[in-house]
Image (cartoon, coloured by chain):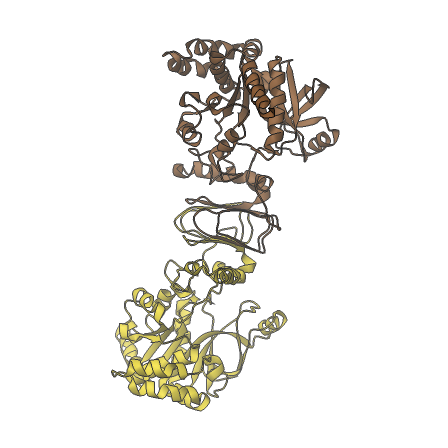
Chain colours: A brown, B yellow
Amino acid sequence: MARATAKQQRAATTKDARVFPVIMAGGSGTRFWPLSRVARPKQFLPLATGRPLIVETLARLKGVAPPRQTFVVCGALHAPLVRKALPAVPKPNVLVEPQARNTAPAIALATAAVAHLDPRGVLVVLPSDQHVADVAAFQASVAEAVELARAGHIVTLGIHPTRPETGYGYIQVGEPLSGTARRVSRFAEKPDRPTAEQYLVSGEYLWNAGLFVFRADVMLEAFKHHMPALAAALEPIRAAWGTRRAERALARHFPDMPATSIDYGIAEKASNIAVVPSRCGWSDVGSFNALPEVRPTDESGNVAVGKDVFLIDAAGCVVVAKDRPIAVVGMKDVVVVDAGDAMLVLPKERSQDVRKVVEALKAKKRLSLL
Amino acid sequence: MARATAKQQRAATTKDARVFPVIMAGGSGTRFWPLSRVARPKQFLPLATGRPLIVETLARLKGVAPPRQTFVVCGALHAPLVRKALPAVPKPNVLVEPQARNTAPAIALATAAVAHLDPRGVLVVLPSDQHVADVAAFQASVAEAVELARAGHIVTLGIHPTRPETGYGYIQVGEPLSGTARRVSRFAEKPDRPTAEQYLVSGEYLWNAGLFVFRADVMLEAFKHHMPALAAALEPIRAAWGTRRAERALARHFPDMPATSIDYGIAEKASNIAVVPSRCGWSDVGSFNALPEVRPTDESGNVAVGKDVFLIDAAGCVVVAKDRPIAVVGMKDVVVVDAGDAMLVLPKERSQDVRKVVEALKAKKRLSLL
């Protein structure tokens, strides 16, 4: 009986407002070199678990919406990887951007695709390269966001900060809305350390995780209002969607969209923005330094990935082995990575400097290593 | 005219007392893991130059004696490697110890082999795994040692110390003998740091480099006098040398020789010991920590071996790459080694702790990695 009710409820929810997850897989970061490469960016790496981040992202949506209602936006280079990693997502749902133009055009494309199926469909837009430890809490937050979106809000998830992180953008919460949701007072850029500490202590700031939930028609309206140039370029794409002319329209008009983030283009400007605070063990897995947040550590705080890592008198290290053993002796807080065809060693606190290697390789035109 | 004289001199020297270099290649150290393995010990690695240490050792003897008069003592496992590395050395000159029993039995074997060819032949016994920067100075010291040996001395080369090294044995010099040579006052064990500093300041101590020069008949006499058990076991080997019974005699009697070092068994006891002090840029290449002594360093004191080492903000590092690139960012005084099938990272000053890895691999029975 209870079971039947749950089923009925699920059916009812689906009918009320079909939910369409949109996984944003256009990223091409360099912070995980040598694991990440131009042809194999972060979202395709098994950084947090044994499965690629993008696979975990889809798995995390189980119960939110079925894979057949899920879209992925990515570049042409990565579309084959997406199709291989996510075979349950229908091929036409893999939306290929003609070029990378930041998040607003990517979301516009997905919004057009969803609007074609269901003008009042609710999009759950989320990055493909994050980690969530508490999936139940995440899904509860998403469910709350979906309800608010249904009512016409553009909703973002805000993560309760656990440290004075300077690498994230923040959301200052405004007045209560309904449930745990709040209006958004403002979006704040990445702060310096003292500001981040102030944010943490104030209890008024949440991390901006880049998750947005909204109705297709609401976002199309927002584009018209706040990003008219984008809306104008989107219009012929939307009109051609589902016809033979779609690909040509996309190739022709997508490059006309301004390369703006959805945060800057819409979220910071729209008045109907809401935030659902969440404690879901979220991490953006921003660099090797973040692996101890998302991976099991040993009693000395080491993260060892791979079966043949020998740690002797080592503490706080991040060691990623591939097909050959790695022995690390007497080291503290160091990152050691073997990608099979290239290796990296650097202090954990300098994980951001991985880009210096990528720059050096670019300067030397070592394309096969990029 | 001058040329003719030099030729004549060489011929005369050769006639006076034929010189027989003996390269000791029985070592099986673990301090260069993962480069060194049971089946590929240090002497076969190109640690100081692009050529294996043992190849450099033979090359260093050019002009001292021809390869056809050169012997190598090694274990059965390494004999094929020796023959491959030193094709100029006649196969019968590769003396295979039935088992590793320290240096006195190995030298006894070589002495028997030389005595068979020339009872008054002069042996120049030297380790296969050292580096000498100034070959001319080395050869001058050896020439002086050969002269003394001819006169009946057992001669060792003593290296002028350049730092208070605690990893070497020392030789205290005694009264002057002839030329630069001195009698030996005593052989001293590896000292602690204050003692090593005292040795350095005193000017009376030289490093014991493990090089010995002596006449075959003089050493056979010394064995009889100071190591009668060894001499007794050597006698049937010597009697069978050059006959069909040689191999059987070796297999049967070699294990009876005491596993003693030539230093302890003879050098510390004999009265006719002399030392020739030398400044020849000698290094025993004892660990990865020693590579900056023997390899070119960059302006930040890094040693990079291999074509694809990317050093960014790195200082005092020792990086050995194999077939794949290694990037080292922001590290100081660290050793990073890729052997192709295994990798090692440790602080340079803990280079001795490489053995801990080898012990761990032994404990885990990872024989393929030993």
Q: Is residue A148 left or right of residue A66?
A: right
Give the residue displayed 38% in from the left and 77% down from the top. B124
Residue A47: x, y in percent?
Answer: 51, 39
Q: Quadrant of the C terminus of chain B?
A: bottom left
Give the residue displayed 42% in from the left and 54% down from the top. B339
Residue found farthest to the front:
A1
Q: Measured along the vertical axis of the image, is residue A156 above or below residue B283?
A: above
Q: Quadrant of the N terminus of chain B?
A: bottom left
Asked whether B93 or A364 is in front, the reply is: B93
Asked whether B40 or B180 is in front, the reply is: B40
Residue A37: x, y in percent?
Answer: 44, 36
Query: Could you say which quadrant of the image residue A220 lies in?
Result: top right
Q: Measured along the vertical axis of the image, is residue B80 above or below residue A329?
A: below
Asked whether A202 or B331 is in front, the reply is: A202
Asked whether B189 or A72 is in front, the reply is: A72
Residue B167: x, y in percent?
Answer: 54, 69
Residue found farthest to the bottom:
B225
- Report if residue A292 is visible in the image: yes
Q: Measured along the vertical axis of the image, is residue B205 above or below residue A269?
A: below
Q: How many marks?
A: 0
Residue B154: x, y in percent?
Answer: 43, 83
Q: Is residue B126 left or right of residue B301?
A: left
Query: Could you say which quadrant of the image residue A272 lies in?
Result: top right
- Report if residue B1 is visible in the image: no
